[in-house]
Amino acid sequence: MSTTAQKPQQKTKKTPHHVQKRLFDKFLKQSVVIHLTSGVKVKGKLTEYDQYTLAVSVKNDEVMIFKHAIALIRPDRTEVEE
């Protein structure tokens, strides 16, 4: 009979929302197009974000968008194509 106790395996702890953080950090200070679940498109510069919201500069105004209302966010390629 073996009396050796097995060590529990340690799980690597990942930061919650690590994919969001990586992409939002990449998009920060860049022009983006945000497609909302309502079908509205918002074009502007991502200025900051937190756990629940994004701040986007749109035509010299700053708007707050709740993350739960976002269907898709992508870089604004029209500035590059011009």
Image (cartoon, rainbow, N blue to C red):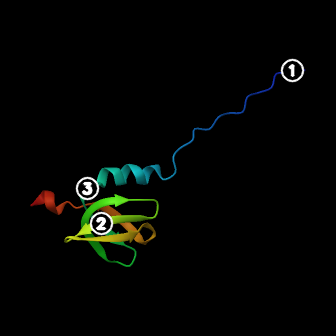
Residue 27 location, quadrant: bottom left
Mark 3 closeness class: few <14, some 14–19, many ≥20 residues within 10 Å: some
Q: Residue 17, how many percent across, how many down? A: 48, 53
Which labelled disc corresponds to residue 61?
none
Q: Within 10 Å of the Cα at label 2, are there few (<14), some (14-19), or many (20+) other Cα atoms?
A: many
Picture coordinates of residue 79 (x, y %)? 14, 60
Kind of residue at badge 2: Val
Looking at marks 2 and 1 on the same chain, the residue that comes earlier in the sequence is marked by 1
| Residue 2 marker | 1
Label 1: few (<14), some (14–19) or many (≥20) C-alpha neighbours in 10 Å: few
**Helix, strand, or loop for circle 3?**
loop
Kind of residue at badge 1:
Ser
46 lies above or below 63:
above
Residue plotted at (31% across, 67% down):
34
Q: CA distance from mark 2 to mark 1?
A: 62 Å
Under circle 1, the secondary element is loop
Would you say 23 lies left or right of 33 here?
right
The location of residue 54, given as percent across then percent down, is 37, 64
Q: Residue furthest right?
A: 1
How far apart are the alpha carbons under marks 3 and 1? 60 Å
Q: Quick check: 69 above or below 82? A: below
Q: Which residue is mark 2?
A: 56
- Residue 32 vertical position relative to residue 58 in the rendered view, above or below: above
Q: Please identify the quarter of the rendering in which residue 48 is found.
A: bottom left
In what quadrant of the picture does the N terminus appear?
A: top right
Residue placed under numbered mark 3 in the picture: 29
